[in-house]
Image (cartoon, rainbow, N blue to C red):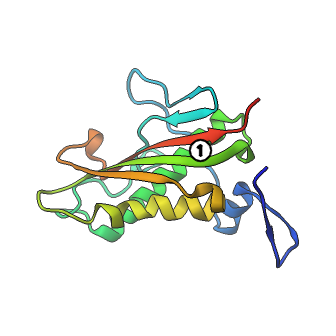
Amino acid sequence: MAQQIDPLYSKAVTALENLQRLGLTLPEPPAAVSNYLPWIRTGNLIVTAGQLPWQGKTMLYPGKLGDSVWVEDGYKAARQAALNAIAQLHAATGGDLEKIVRIVRVEGNVHCAAGFRDHPRVLDGASDFFVEIFEERGRHVRSALGISDMPLNASIQLTVWAEVAAG
């Protein structure tokens, strides 16, 4: 699999080890809040449903960017949504994140006030996180859109496309 060698420890560094290095554990994958699947696999692709910045049952940083939510908090919200997406990918791979060949695409929706233009800075929270966890496998293409309303007043929502090893 696509593992890196950490020169300090001379051993393979996995996605779970990178999470542990950051002091993080995978949460339970958030359940769907309506009539849809939290993820689906088709061929060698896994696509997540929109992931919100849930931490347990708490929505982190609710509201609109450029109004009641600062860019720095939006960045943190995107990072939390990315962690939830990784929990979905963990479930979809049967608990083996090393089956993830690459994060292919991240679609980000930013709940924002009129005139807000810092969508890329907000969604860098997710993009930076995917690279921290998956290293080169975490580099991806991305779309960043601003929307005027969001389910549950979430500040951001991510959909992730990941290539998974055959089998």
Quarter of the image for residue 24 reads bottom right
Task: Report the residue at 17% width, 47% height from top.
Answer: 148
Q: Residue at x 33, y 58 (%)?
A: 61
The percent position of residue 127, horizontal first and vertical second, equals: 48, 60
**Image quadrant assignment for residue 51:** top left
Q: Residue furthest bottom?
A: 8
**Eyeballing the image, is 103 above or below 30?**
below
The vertical placement of 40 against 124, above or below, is: above
Q: In the structure shown, which secondary structural element does the residue marked by tag 1 occupy?
A: helix
Q: Residue 114 or 31: which is nearer the viewer?
A: 114
Q: Residue at x 73, y 32 (%)?
A: 166
Residue 90 image point, x, y percent: 65, 41
Which residue is the extreme one toward the right? Answer: 10
Q: Which residue sits furthest top? A: 35
Q: Where in the figure is residue 29, as x and y percent of width and height?
A: 56, 39
Instruction: Please rate how many residues cluster around mark 1, counting C-alpha atoms within 10 Å: few if below 14, some from 14 to 19, many from 20.
Output: many
Residue 57 vertical placement versus 126 (above, below): above
Pick the front one: 35 or 10: 10
Q: Is residue 14 left or right of residue 116?
A: right
Q: Is residue 27 visible?
A: no
Q: Is 135 placed left or right of 1 in the picture?
A: left
Relative placement, left or right, of 109 versus 40 is left
Q: Please, which residue is most extreme toward the front here?
A: 141
Q: Of 64 and 127, which appears nearest the observer?
A: 127
User: Split into 4 quadrants, where in the image is the C terminus?
Assistant: top right
The residue indicated by pointer 1 is 87
Total number of numbered discs in the rendering: 1
Residue lying at 39% horizontally and 64% vertically, measured from the top left = 75
The reply to whether residue 1 is visible in this rendering is yes
| Amino acid found under the numbered disc labelled 1 | Ala
- The x, y position of residue 149, in whole percent, is 19, 44
